Image: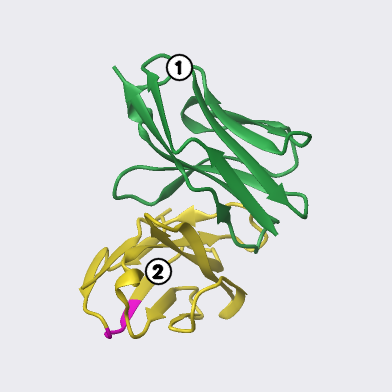
């Protein structure tokens, strides 16, 4: 079985500051991990994914995440926040293709000018 | 290539009615999954269809059902609607053997 915990339901950063959104997972099989972003009244857009290749994964819009098996973590970072990054972010895990995505509760990112 | 489309985008129903939502996957994608998103429960997996067969099922009552057609389009049906069924219903498609799911914009269902 898989589960995801996202630490912090709300995160607030200043424009230009580092963005760090935390995600810890639990999985009984080698996990595939994903970060999705959701803007108001829209569906989910994939930011990046980890599927057992490189542990440091680069995604769209300057985001990246590092898979740390020893810490069961997959935190999302961006060096410099932009106003357009304000959205809700979801971490998700699956045991592989054809399996359901299990999502965390989400983190709402607010970017202050 | 067109993305995942869902119709209708918004629905208002009353308790006890039934509703059918439609999802057209990205061309070539044979797997379609459905998720329910609510403020209280977050994003929860409903079911997955692949080649017209249900391959995975989440923990929802039998009032929630789905099907997939030979062209990979999928529908989900909710019978005897309850107030708690008000949610955003998201559909996602993926390639056979693919690890990435592409989401549609969702159908917002309001049950009065």
What residue appears at the point 67 percent right and 36 percent down from the top-left corner? A73
What residue appears at the point 36 percent right and 62 percent down from the top-left corner? B5
Q: Residue A81 appears at what percent x and percent y?
A: 42, 20
Q: Residues within 10 Å of mark 1 (few under 14, many from 20)?
A: some
Describe residue B7's horizontal placement relative to residue B61 as left or right: left
Residue that badge 1 annotates: A80
What residue appears at the point 31 percent right and 84 percent down from the top-left corner? B18
Q: Point out the image quarter for the C terminus of chain A.
A: top left
Q: Nearer the viewer, residue B39 or B3?
A: B39
Q: Nearer the viewer, residue A38 or B111?
A: B111
Q: Point out the image quarter for the N terminus of chain A.
A: bottom right
- State the image quarter where residue A50 is shown: top right
Q: In the image, is residue B17 part of the stretch drawn in magenta?
A: yes
Say if A104 sits above or below B33 in the image.
above
Marks 2 & 1 on one chain:
no
Q: Residue A93 appears at what percent x and percent y?
A: 63, 50
Residues in magenta, as a range: B16-20
Say which chain is green: A
Mark in the foreground, 2 or 1: 1
Describe residue A24's horizontal placement relative to residue B17 as left or right: right
Label ID, residue B112: none
Q: In the image, is residue B19 part of the stretch drawn in magenta?
A: yes
- State the image quarter where residue B88 is shown: bottom left
Image hue for chain B: yellow
């Amino acid at each position: 079985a898989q589960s995801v915990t996202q630490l912090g339901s709300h995160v607030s950063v200043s424009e230009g500051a580092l963005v760090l959104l935390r995600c810890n997972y639990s999985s009984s099989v080698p996990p595939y991990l994903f970060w999705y972003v959701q803007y108001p009244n829209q569906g989910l857009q994939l930011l990046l994914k980890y599927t057992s290749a490189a542990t440091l994964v680069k995604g769209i819009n300057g985001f990246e995440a590092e898979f740390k098996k020893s810490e069961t973590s997959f935190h999302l970072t961006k060096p410099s926040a932009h106003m357009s990054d304000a959205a809700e972010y979801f971490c998700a895990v699956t045991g592989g293709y054809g399996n359901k995505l299990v999502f965390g509760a989400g983190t709402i990112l607010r970017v202050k000018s | 290539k067109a993305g995942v489309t869902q119709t209708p985008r918004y629905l208002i129903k009353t308790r006890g009615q039934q509703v059918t939502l439609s999802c057209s996957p990205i061309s070539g994608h044979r797997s379609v999954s459905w998720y329910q998103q609510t403020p209280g429960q977050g994003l929860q997996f409903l079911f997955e269809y692949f080649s017209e067969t249900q391959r995975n099922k989440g923990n929802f009552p039998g009032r929630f059902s789905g099907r997939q057609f030979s062209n990979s389009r999928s529908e989900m049906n909710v019978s005897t609607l309850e107030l708690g069924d008000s949610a955003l219903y998201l559909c996602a498609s993926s390639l056979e053997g693919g690890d990435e799911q592409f989401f549609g914009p969702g159908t917002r269902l309001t049950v009065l």
